[in-house]
């Protein structure tokens, strides 16, 4: 009895220093710990602290130690560790690695995690039934507080732009009279209100910040959970090169209360590269050459096209041939002159046979490498393969590709009268600017006529050639035609000093020019020298974004308009876009004299048939 009293005295001393124990019949001592901290039975509490709703806390491991002299059996069923009073079911016990019995001097462990699903305090009681005679139901309390949080996220479209490491690229952008505006969204993915705390709400800084402006007129500073607000950034470069800045959004998101991301863009200035021609190879920056008949020269080059390998094809009005040059500016030869094959001799005479041309004015190379030529003086469209072999011609009242002589003009739907422009769409349909018939004709790839548009009304027609007119559904000697990816048809209605647009069904949409913006359906067609007018436009090209490039021939410039019919400016004489009166002609490498055909390649190089300067010019946008 006296010995037992001594043992209980020792046990009391152990408890007095903060340890909760359970003693079995042979005085087995059981200690519950989290880390090095002892959790007392009945009075013990473990606090998980404040945890954001929807986010798991760290998983805390608890140890059951047996420093006694015999094994300890955990008798709880069905689980050795039991949980009660967890009203919100926010605590999860993992006891997969536990063992029972616990041998003397050994331990076993379990873990608990807290995942609050509602705001406020959550509590539960942990119970550990065991076979000891003292504290055979070991209990302690666990608690934690669920709190809400705001969660900021910035997106452009469907793309997230993470803070600190995120960026947005405006891409390459020409310095001109326009800007590029992009809209961004700030969303609150959290469960508490997101407050944008700065004034102004969105800020920016950096070396080039003045080239980026912010439109936050509709941006709100308090965003409820699940809601968004928007702002936009406008990129307006004023000098060439790579431009960058940083966007700053101050907010109450505890994790990202300085939300930043970078923005950048590349500013380019359209500028002349040089020209080819002049009896030698290579791109040059000297003054314009004289006309000549050797294979490295031109005499009134009128139109230009490209193949998939970057080769340049030029139609020469007075040399009665199609010349081919590589992308480095080296002449490859020419076709025409009564025989097949590429030649490097002097220019041929004109002729009506199927291997010759008489004052051709337009050329187009399709995706398969076939070369189509508006053989204007012979009133026909010719087709050649990439190796320089003539396939035949269409027109002159015939059906299908012909290999006989042919030169007769006519007004019937399967004739031409001085065709001056040709374009082939992705389906092989051939569109022809039938100049003196005042119409655009359409033929299929087999050489069958499919009608024409013009003549003061909509729709494809199988009628005689039209009288000229200046209403929006008519033409006055159209000189070129272009078909975009949506099968819209653009026409250089040259003598009406305008660019017309029609849909694929043959319905006139309107025209641009005459000193103001927008597609119009009136009949006014005056020439002009301001940047919104034309004076005998002859060539045109529509790029993949819908921008329209126009050879404004008698204004000696290249004009650019957007898809909505708004003039963007013109270039000639110096780098950059202008919106002043038309320039005078010139022979310097940055000037033009009656430019006609135009082509824009996929890399942004612009090729111009600088007709009266007898050269092909190259610019980079």
Image (cartoon, rainbow, N blue to C red):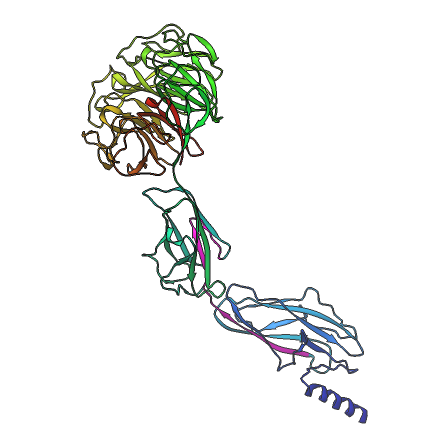
Residue range in magenta is 137-163
Q: Taking 123 as reference, is 205 left or right?
A: left
Return the x and y of residue 193 as percentages of the image width and height.
Answer: 41, 65
Return the x and y of residue 361 as percentages of the image width and height.
Answer: 34, 18
Return the x and y of residue 49 as percentages of the image width and height.
Answer: 55, 73
- Is 109 drawn above or below residue 241 in the view shown? below
Quadrant of image for the C terminus: top left
Residue located at (28% from left, 36% from top): 565
Residue 72 shows in this picture: yes
- Is 254 drawn above or below residue 21 in the view shown? above
Magenta part mainly helix, strand or loop? strand
Q: Residue furthest bottom?
A: 2
Residue 473 shows in this picture: no
Residue 112 falls in which quadrant of the image?
bottom right
| Of the pair 170 and 255, the residue shown nearer to us | 170
Return the x and y of residue 373 as percentages of the image width and height.
Answer: 38, 17
Q: Taking 292 as reference, is 255 left or right?
A: right
Q: Residue furthest front?
A: 286
- Is 433 drawn above or below residue 122 in the view shown? above
Residue 340 on the magenta segment: no
């Amino acid at each position: 009895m006296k010995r037992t009293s001594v043992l209980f005295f020792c046990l009391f001393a152990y408890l007095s220093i903060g340890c909760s124990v359970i003693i079995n019949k042979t005085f087995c001592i059981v200690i519950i710990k989290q880390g090095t901290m002892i959790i007392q039975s009945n009075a013990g509490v473990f606090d998980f602290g404040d945890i954001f709703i929807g986010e798991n806390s760290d998983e805390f491991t608890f140890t059951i130690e047996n420093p006694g002299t015999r094994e300890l059996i955990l008798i709880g069923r069905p689980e050795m560790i039991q949980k009660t009073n967890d009203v919100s079911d926010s605590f999860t016990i993992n006891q997969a690695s536990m063992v029972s019995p616990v041998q003397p001097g050994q331990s076993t462990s379990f873990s608990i995690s807290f995942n609050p699903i509602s705001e406020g305090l959550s509590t539960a009681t942990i119970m550990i039934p065991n076979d000891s005679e003292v504290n055979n139901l070991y209990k302690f309390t666990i608690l934690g507080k669920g709190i809400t949080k705001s969660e900021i996220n910035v997106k452009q479209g469907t793309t997230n732009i993470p803070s600190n490491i995120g960026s947005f690229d405006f891409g390459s952008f020409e310095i001109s009279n326009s800007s590029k505006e992009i809209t961004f969204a700030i969303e609150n993915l959290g469960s508490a209100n997101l407050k944008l705390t700065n004034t102004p709400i969105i800020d920016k800084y950096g070396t080039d910040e003045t080239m980026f402006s912010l439109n936050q007129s509709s941006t709100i500073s308090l965003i409820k959970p699940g809601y968004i607000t928007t702002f936009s950034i406008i990129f307006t470069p004023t000098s060439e090169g790579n431009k960058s800045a940083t966007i700053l959004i101050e907010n109450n998101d505890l994790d990202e209360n300085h939300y930043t991301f970078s923005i950048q863009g590349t500013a380019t200035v359209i500028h002349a590269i040089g020209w080819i021609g002049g009896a030698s190879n290579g791109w040059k920056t000297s003054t314009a050459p004289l006309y000549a008949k050797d294979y490295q020269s031109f005499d009134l080059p009128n139109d230009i096209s490209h193949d998939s390998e970057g080769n340049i094809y030029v139609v020469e009005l007075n040399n009665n041939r199609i010349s081919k040059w590589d992308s480095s500016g080296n002449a490859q030869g020419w076709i025409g002159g009564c025989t097949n094959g590429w030649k490097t001799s002097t220019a041929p005479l004109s002729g009506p046979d199927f291997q010759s041309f008489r004052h051709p004015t337009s050329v187009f190379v399709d995706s398969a490498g076939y070369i189509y030529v508006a053989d204007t003086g012979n009133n026909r469209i010719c087709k050649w393969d990439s190796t320089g072999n003539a396939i035949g011609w269409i027109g002159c009242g015939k059906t299908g590709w012909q290999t006989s002589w042919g030169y007769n003009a006519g007004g019937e739907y399967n004739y031409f009268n001085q065709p001056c422009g040709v374009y082939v769409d992705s389906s092989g349909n051939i569109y022809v600017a039938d100049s003196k018939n005042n119409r655009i004709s359409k033929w299929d790839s087999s050489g069958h006529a499919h009608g024409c548009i013009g003549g003061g009304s909509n729709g494809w027609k199988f009628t005689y050639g039209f009288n000229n007119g200046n209403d929006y559904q008519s033409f006055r000697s159209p000189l070129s035609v272009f078909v975009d990816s949506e099968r819209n048809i653009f026409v250089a209605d040259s003598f009406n000093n305008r660019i017309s647009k029609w849909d694929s069904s043959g319905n006139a949409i309107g025209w641009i020019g005459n000193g103001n913006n927008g597609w119009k359906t009136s009949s006014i067609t005056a020439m002009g020298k301001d940047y919104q007018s034309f004076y005998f436009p002859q060539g045109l090209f529509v790029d993949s974004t819908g921008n329209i490039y126009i050879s404004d021939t008698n204004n000696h410039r290249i004009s650019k308009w957007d898809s909505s019919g708004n003039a963007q400016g013109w270039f000639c004489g110096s780098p950059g876009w202008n919106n002043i009166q038309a320039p005078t002609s010139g022979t310097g490498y940055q000037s033009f004299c009656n430019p006609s055909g135009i082509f824009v390649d996929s890399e942004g190089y612009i090729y111009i048939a600088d007709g009266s300067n007898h050269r092909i010019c190259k610019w980079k946008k």
